[in-house]
Image (spheres, grey):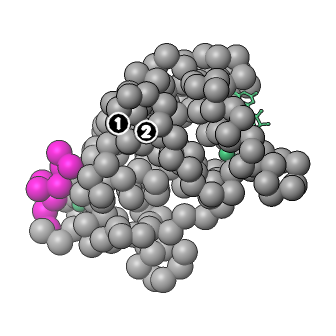
C-alpha cells in the first residue's frame, strides 16, 4: 500500500515522506530494514511514536508551511500523531470519532486542520485497499524515483524492466542500488494491473 501511495504522490507531483509510527513497538533491526527500503528510493523516513512522544518535532518540521495529508491503513496512528502534535485538536477529533457511535476512534471522513499559521494537515480515514487513481501505468517506471537514473540506459526503448535482456533497472537491482522489495512492488503492479487484477 505504501508503494501505491507513493506512486499516486509521484504521479501528481506531490512531495511525500514516509512516517513509521509506533516505533515504541518496533524491533530495531526490522525498523532499520524497512526504513532503508524507502530511503534508497529517495524519500525522507521519519520514526515516530505518538504514545511515547518520539519524533514529533521532526514531524512538525516536515509538515510546517505545507498543506499535507496523513494517509495510510486504519489503526497506524494518524489521528494520534495529529493529536500528539497539537494537543488542543484532541477534542475536535474525538468529537468526530465518537459520532460513529462505535466506541472506536476510527476516522470516518477527511478533515483539514490548521495547525500553524501556514500549516494545514488533513487527517484521513484509514484505507483498506488502494487503487491507482490517476496513475498512468505506461509511465510507471518514471514514478519510481530510484529507477529514473537508469531509464535511458536499457537496451530496448520500450523495455518494461521485467525479463528483457540488457535492462539497466534489473541490473541496478542485482547491483543492490535499487531495493529488491521496491522492484518487486513495481513488477507486481506492471504484471497485475496490466491483466486487470486489482
Ligand atoms: N503503541 C503505540 N500505539 C499507538 C501509537 N500511536 C497510536 N497508537 C494506538 O493505535 C490505535 C489507533 O490509533 P489511531 O490514531 O486511531 O489510528 P488512525 O491511523 O487514525 O486510524 P483510522 O482513523 O482508523 O485510520 C490507538 O489505539 C492508538 O492509541 C504509538 O505510537 N504507539
Ligand atoms: Mg484516524
Ligand atoms: Zn529496462
Label whose residue precedes the other's in the sequence (2 or 1): 1
Quadrant of the displayed image that contains ligand 3: bottom left
Residue 188 higher or lower than 197, as above or below: above
Report the residue at 48% width, 73% height from top: 192
Magenta stretch contains residue 29: no
Report the residue at 46% width, 19% height from top: 58
Q: Is residue 23 left or right of residue 155?
A: right
The image quarter containing residue 50 is top right
Element type at marker 1?
Answer: loop
Q: Within 10 angstroms of label 2, few (less than 14), some, or many (20 or more) residues?
A: some
Residue to which mark 1 is pinned:
66
Element type at marker 2?
Answer: strand
Give coordinates of residue 143: x percent, y percent. 29, 56
Residue to which mark 2 is pinned:
120
The image quarter containing residue 125 is bottom right
Magenta stretch contains residue 150: yes
Span shown in magenta: 148-156
Give coordinates of residue 170: x percent, y percent. 31, 53
Give coordinates of residue 197: x percent, y percent. 53, 79
Amino acid at each position: 500500500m505504501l508503494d501505491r501511495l507513493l506512486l499516486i504522490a509521484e504521479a501528481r507531483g506531490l512531495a511525500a515522506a514516509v512516517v513509521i509510527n509506533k516505533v515504541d513497538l518496533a524491533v530495531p533491526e526490522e525498523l532499520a530494514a524497512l526504513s532503508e527500503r524507502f530511503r534508497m528510493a529517495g524519500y525522507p523516513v521519519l520514526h515516530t511514536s505518538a504514545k511515547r512522544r518520539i519524533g514529533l518535532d521532526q514531524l512538525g518540521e516536515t509538515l510546517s508551511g505545507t498543506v499535507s495529508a496523513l494517509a495510510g491503513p486504519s489503526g497506524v496512528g494518524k489521528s494520534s500523531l495529529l493529536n500528539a502534535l497539537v494537543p488542543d485538536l484532541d477534542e475536535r477529533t474525538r468529537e468526530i470519532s465518537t459520532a460513529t457511535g462505535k466506541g472506536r476512534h476510527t476516522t470516518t471522513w477527511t478533515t483539514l486542520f490548521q495547525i500553524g499559521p501556514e500549516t494545514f494537515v488533513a487527517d484521513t480515514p484509514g484505507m483498506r485497499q488502494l487503487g491507482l487513481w490517476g496513475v498512468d501505468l505506461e509511465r510507471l517506471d518514471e514514478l519510481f524515483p530510484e529507477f529514473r537514473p537508469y531509464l535511458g540506459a536499457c537496451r530496448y526503448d520500450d523495455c518494461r524492466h521485467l525479463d528483457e535482456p540488457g535492462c539497466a533497472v534489473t541490473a541496478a537491482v542485482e547491483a543492490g542500488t535499487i531495493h529488491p522489495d521496491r522492484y518487486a512492488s513495481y513488477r507486481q503492479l506492471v504484471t497485475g494491473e496490466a491483466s486487470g487484477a486489482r
